[in-house]
Amino acid sequence: MTEAASTARISVRGAGKRYDALEVFRAIDLEIGQREIVTLVGPSGCGKTTLLRCVDGLIPLSEGAIAVDGTPVHEPRAGVAMVFQHFGLFPWKSVYDNVAYGLRLAGASRAEIGAKVPYFVSLVGLKGFERAYPYQISGGMQQRCGLARALATEPSVMLMDEPFAAVDAQTREILQFELLRIWDIRPMTMLFVTHSIEEAVLMGDRVVVLKGRPSMVFETITVDLPRPRGRQTLGLPRFNELREHVWATLMDEARRAEFSVSS
Amino acid sequence: MSARRLGWTITAAGLAAGATLWEIAGRSVGAAFVAPLSDTIEALTPSVWRALASSLGLFATGFALSVAIGVPFGLLLARMRLLRVALESYIAILNATPMAALIPFILSMMGFGFAPKVLVVFLFAVFPILYNTVEGARSIRPELIEVARSFRSSERALWRDVLLPFVLPFALTGIRQAIGRALVGMVAAEFFLSASGIGMVLQSASQSIDTATVFAAILLVTLLGVLLMELGSWVEGRYAAWRNIR
């Protein structure tokens, strides 16, 4: 299969978003292949999450177009699942029922739910907590549940909205390795928004850096680290090089923004 | 002794002390002013119980109506922003209005039948339900609605899976508050509209200075109120556990 023949799973062309006078981002082009993880980094308020929600079809673009598997996105579609920053679990539903939520909405049979939910619950390491309610488990476990809910619909595309930003640093690392492990078992397309440079390099095949006002794609960095990745990846000299590279790209902007008042 | 049992023991001791004090006060002040507990219990005649049963019919009708109208209407306000903005201030105003002041107006409009009395109970009870339901609907986390949309929920499924379960605990709080208000409404209606049930017992007994019967009627309504409120709290705890711990 030639490079041209491998069609992109997600294709973003000339995407722009504005709220009245505020232009959030402009002219964003992005192609994400099957089994590719693209991480999206940029300063706060640069519109990373907004772009992600546009890809999910939750909000419309102002300009340009987004397609998934060649079909234009106008509303949320099957085969695309999102993992939310604040987990978005239903507090009145047990872990089991939260994980089953997407399947039930998709009209899955009782037998199908009975087979899939326990599988995904144990895949994310929540076996034994099926009957627990979100308020009874830790933040890390809650996001495992959010992950299982998205995975259970067996999507070909996962959209990750800073999924580990709301948990503590140690839990965050554990969840990163868990996600890498799961991805190795069930590889899929992933668009991953994060604030963490380390996370962006660890997870991504490419790191897309958004910058400017309105923000545009400033640089795309190919992460040529071997898979499967895991804890050992953090020790590779190449990992540090890439991290430094992304850091320099981002911080240049951040410093300018911080001191822009005095200039 | 467990803390729970200790708590119960103290509560029981407190109630016993109160009952004793009541008995002593009644015997020293005189039965015409304060009927002692023993006289009050003796005054719980079948006719007082029958009066209570008749009052309960009024209470149940008005209360059921306020739940049946208050909750759905509150939910409607939740989903229709325009309607909510338009009516919100009215709900707040009517929630604060002393409903007893409206009774003469209802009397002149509707007369002495059963319907105006039901209306009084309904008006007393419906606003806490409406107010709490709307309040609950307003506090729905937008993120949860976004989750539902992201998973391609239909509007019907959104109601079933997100809106109703979220609003339920708030509605139950309103319903619990409404129990007390409906009881006040019940007695007020029976007092100021055509005398019936417990209201009539209270009226005729106090006119003939039969303090024991007056106390018996009050005691019954109070116990009923406590019982219903406890029931309300239990239901609330059963279906709204997630809300307090969140």
Image (cartoon, rainbow, N blue to C red):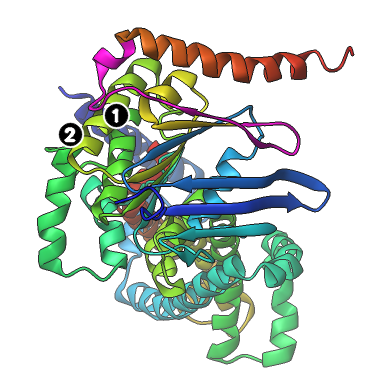
Q: Is residue A133 above or below residue B7?
A: below
Q: Is residue A249 visible?
A: yes
Looking at the image, residue B158 sits to the left or right of residue B82; the answer is: left
Residue A259 drawn above or below residue A4: above
Image quadrant in which you'd find residue B244: top left
Q: Position of residue A63 (x, y in %)?
A: 69, 58
Q: Tell me the element at label 2.
A: loop
Residue span colored magenta? A210-234
The residue that label 2 is drawn on is A125
Q: Which of B128 and A117 is in front in this view?
A: A117
Q: Closer to the camera: disc 1 or disc 2?
A: 2
> Which residue does the image show at 54% across and 64% down from the upper left?
B129
Q: Do labels 1 and 2 share a chain?
A: no
Q: Which residue lies furthest to the right in this view?
A: A263
Q: Could you say which is closer to the camera, residue A165 or residue B134?
A: A165
Q: Quadrant of the N terminus of chain B?
A: top left
Residue A1 part of the magenta segment: no
The amino acid marked with disc number 1 is: Ile
